[in-house]
Image (cartoon, grey):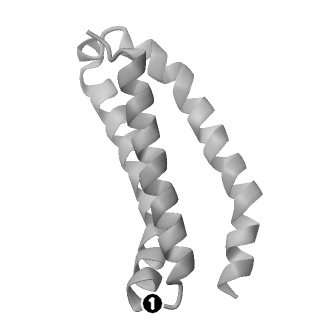
Amino acid sequence: MPPLPIYMLTGCSFALMIISSCILLSSKYEASFLVQSLHKTGQLALTFYLAHVIIGMGIIEEINPSKWGNTQLTLRCLMPCFSVFYVLSLLLFGQNIRNQDH
């Protein structure tokens, strides 16, 4: 049974709360060694995560596509959308991030 809309809304709200809290804390304590370490680590984390998901799902799909069922079509439609969104967000916000580092 798929998650119901209230469940998804709760999950998204909780994620936004955590992300907002992290942004507020990191801007308040930006000179802290811990925040600087997490900032540099986080720059690579999203890239590695996306690569692991895309490559991992590609390998599973090639090995045994029947295990995916109807999800396979959905993923084939959504993956290009996620990739375009990721590249556009890097182009839009990447310049601001680079300017803040220097």
Q: How many marks?
A: 1
Instruction: Relative to 100, say whether 44 is above or below.
Output: above
Any part of residue 24 in sight = yes
**Residue 37: x %, y % from top left:** 41, 83
Task: Name the side, left or right, on which 72 lies relative to 96.
Answer: left
Is residue 47 shown to the viewer in this render?
Answer: no
Residue at figure coordinates x 36%, y 48% from the top left: 52
Image quadrant assignment for residue 90: bottom right
User: Considering the numbered disc 1 on the image, is that residue within a helix, a strand or a loop?
Assistant: loop
Spot occupied by residue 27 in the image (x, y as percentages of width and height): 57, 76
Quadrant holding the C terminus: bottom right
57 vs 16, left or right, is left
Which residue corresponds to mark 1?
Answer: 32
Three-letter code, disc 1: Ser
- Along the line of sight, the residue nearer the viewer: 54 or 59: 54
Which percent across, then down, holds residue 56? 32, 40
Compare residues 6 and 89 and report the one nearer the observer: 6
Residue 39 sits above or below residue 63 on the image: below
Q: Position of residue 58 (x, y in %)?
A: 38, 33
Residue occupying image coordinates x 42% and y 17%: 5
Q: Is residue 50 above or below residue 74?
A: below
- The residue at 41%/58% (across/down) is 48
Q: Depth check: give the residue in front, 3 or 63.
A: 3
**Callout 1: few (<14), some (14-19), or many (20+) C-alpha neighbours within 10 Å?**
few
Image quadrant holding the N terminus, namely top left
Q: Residue at x 49, y 47 (%)?
A: 16
